[in-house]
Amino acid sequence: MILTDLTLAQAREGLRAKKFSARALTEAHLAAIEKLNPRLNAFITVTPELALAQADAADRAYAEGEAGALTGLPLAIKDLFCTEGVRTTAASRILGNFIPPYESTVTAKLKDAGAVFLGKTNLDEFAMGSSNMTSAFGAVENPWKRRGDDTPLVPGGSSGGSAAVVAARLALGATGTDTGGSIRQPASFCGITGIKPTYGRCSRYGIIAFASSLDQAGPMARTVEDCAILLGAMAGFDPKDSTSAERAVPDFAAACRRGVKGLRIGVPKEYAVPGMPDEIAALWQRGRDWLRAAGAELVEISLPHTRYALATYYIVAPAECSSNLARYDGVRFGRREDGADLIEMYERTRAAGFGDEVKRRIMIGTYVLSAGYYDAYYLRAQKVRSLILGDFTNAFAGCDAILTPTAPSAAFAQGEKMDDPITMYLNDVFTVPASLAGLPAISLPAGCDRAGLPLGLQVIGKPFDEETVFAVAAEIEAAAGFSASPTLRAGSGA
Amino acid sequence: MSLDPATVRRIAHLARIHIGEDEIPRLQTELNGILGWVEQLAEIDVTDIPPLTGAAQMALRTREDVVSDGGIVEKILANAPERADDYFVVPKVVE
């Protein structure tokens, strides 16, 4: 048995049945990281001593019959979640040496459930990007390769490191965050599953902020059920986050077994964008066929403001980013550059500490919020955001969930789509609308393109109805029987 | 609407990001590209549409106005670039 090939649910069964120890499971993953991470660059920080100590504690818990939902299961944490005493960088030079004095709520919950943390994963700087190319700690290599072609591909972003480690079997699961598609697009590019839950489902406390009205944490794993198990541990009300929802956490894993009989699945006609690759259009059609065969009813729906979602997002998100990132001023934490006076110290610190994409977004955000332009840009974008939410509300009057492709392409090569910022922004065309509306949405691998690269389908649900999202995704997963695996992975001898 | 070099300089200063003169042409092109692209929102009729400020469809909670945390000076100062006793140190502000 190759321990790194197990799903999270299988590993938990094995630990409970004492087929192997948590220490052995953790050591297998640490060995795989040691071998593959120098090439993938998917972890910024690996914490083997902490992981082994947590694994030993897990073995004691199993011996004493006190194991929790995730006891002894090795996970990777996106380096955007503050972890007490463990460096947390947001993949930025400005936080290169930041050691948080506190723990994020989501990671605290995972620890309480008994999880083992292997380390902190790479990402686009401050989660701003769709390729992981903006990290101050270098690009991440996607473990998948085009058939017969060793060109390094991007893992997507911003949670690209998390997606790559799960795909390469360096962890059983990982945390991600999603502001406009940062869990779903890398999940699609790396052939894994990832869900952005409803805004408010997971606490934002201790997650380094990008755009606070959009940021939401979620799990990434190799199966729908594994994501359901992880989300169950991550979710829940937190008084430390003013937008945390006071709602009970349902049994997401049980929802995976509900089936789709009688469900109405909406297919938005506006997502059939001109120029969609035929392989993605065909996969989307297969998804519809699978669900129909399983007893669901497929209905065409209209989300008329879809084509304005990206532009809306690229006003709202930079505006919030410019405000959130004002805190990096070289005074209380993070990097400082000297200046003749306070203002010059701020300006030199931020110029040296932030990368180009972060600076661009801060400047766009500063402009759209500035006197004289606020109404024309920011206020107008917020009104269009209302219209986009209204589209979904209207559509959900006639359907239970929505099926779309996750991304407009498979993984692209490192260095592609870098010519101008907008080309990169177009990656998020199918994921941004659900983000603006705060809706739960999952991406799961459903097939491969002609080059052998994975392609994802997205299921979007009603607010706080992750259960239906899991039910539909589990049905697609079963029908798709996706079994391809990446070239670079633990246990492959690569 | 097109940003001129002076406006690029002004935005950078408002954002407290130092930029060199040699960076201005590139930033001008990139920022104008993005602003030109988002200009498409102008074609939508938003008359009487209320702005949506966030995805959380709920009223913000309030809590008791009491001290709930404190006494963690060392934790707060632990990451300071420069400190003196229990203070953050910054360049001289008042002459």
Image (spheres, coloured by chain):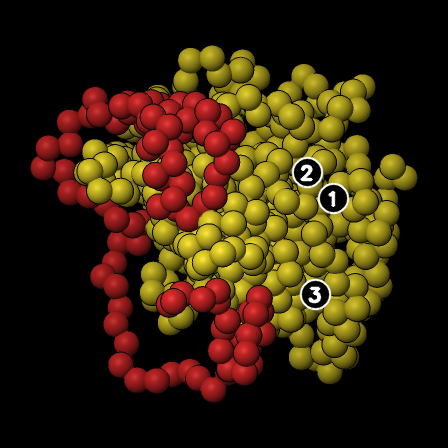
Classify residue A388 as left or right of residue A220. left
Residue A341 lies, in percent from the top left, at 45, 58
Residue visible at 74% across and 76% down? Answer: A57
Residue ranking furthest to the front: B95
| Residue named by callout 3 | A116
Judge by depth and name the residue closer to the eye, A113 or A134: A134
Q: Position of residue A104 (x, y in %)?
A: 52, 66
Chain ID at mark 3: A
**Outermost residue toward the left in this view:** B48
Residue type marked 3: Val
Farthest residue, direction bottom:
B71
Residue at horizontal 23 percent and vertical 36 percent from the top:
A373
Q: Earlier in the sequence, mark 2 or mark 1?
A: 1
Q: Nearer the viewer, mark 3 or mark 1?
A: 1
Q: Is residue A239 left or right of residue A107?
A: left
Q: Which chain is red?
A: B
Q: Which chain is yellow?
A: A
Tell me which label, 3 or 1, sits earlier in the chain: 1
In the picture of the structure, the residue carrying the numbered disc 2 is A139
What percent of the width, then of the height, locates residue A309?
34, 31
* Left or right: where A424 falls relative to A70: left
Tell if the residue under mark 2 belongs to the same chain as the one under mark 1: yes
State the separation of the CA atoms marked 2 and 1. 7 Å
Q: What numbered label is drawn on residue A41?
A: 1
